[in-house]
Image (tube, grey):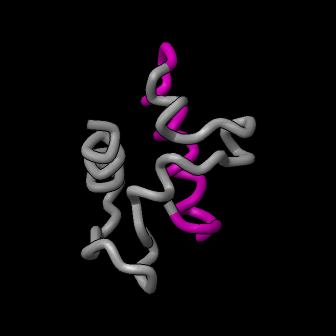
């Protein structure tokens, strides 16, 4: 369910989703979602989605990542 939420957020933000592949900007989304992220105070996107207003926080991080081309979601 969390992967579907992240995919939906990315599509809403205008990101072109590619098949999950290491060379794509998304890369393996299933791995990204469980890895701690410094911009999420060391929490994983999955952990953040379980928090109140977590989807909004994750959207902010994704917007910043897409805008600045930082790392890959």
Classify residue 24 by image quadrant: bottom left
Relative horizontal placement of residue 23, taking residue 4 as reference (left or right): right
User: Residue 22: percent from the left, percent from the top?
Assistant: 44, 80
Near-viewer residue (58 or 28): 28
Q: Residue at x 65, y 36 (%)?
A: 43
Reply above or below: 39 against 55: below
Q: Residue at x 57, y 45 (%)?
A: 61
Image: magenta residue range: 51-72
User: Residue 18: percent from the left, percent from the top?
Assistant: 28, 75
Q: Is residue 58 magenta?
A: yes
Q: Residue at x 51, y 46 (%)?
A: 34
Relative horizontal placement of residue 8, taking residue 33 as reference (left or right): left
Instruction: Label the magenta part by its dominant secondary structure.
Output: helix
User: Residue 48: percent from the left, percent from the top?
Assistant: 53, 30
Reply above or below: 56 against 4: above
Reply above or below: 39 against 11: above
Reply above or below: 21 against 54: below
Q: Residue at x 51, y 51 (%)?
A: 63
User: Residue 53: percent from the left, percent from the top?
Assistant: 48, 19
Relative horizontal placement of residue 44, taking residue 1 as reference (left or right): right
The N terminus lies in quadrant: top left
Near-viewer residue (11 or 23): 23
Q: Is residue 60 magenta?
A: yes
Near-viewer residue (53 or 28): 28
């Amino acid at each position: 369910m969390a992967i579907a939420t992240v995919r939906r957020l990315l599509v809403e933000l205008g990101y072109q989703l590619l098949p999950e592949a290491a060379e794509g900007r998304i890369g393996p989304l299933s791995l990204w979602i469980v890895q701690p992220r410094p911009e999420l105070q060391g929490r994983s996107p999955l952990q953040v989605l379980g928090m109140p207003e977590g989807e909004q926080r994750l959207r902010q991080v994704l917007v910043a990542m897409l805008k600045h081309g930082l790392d890959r979601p």
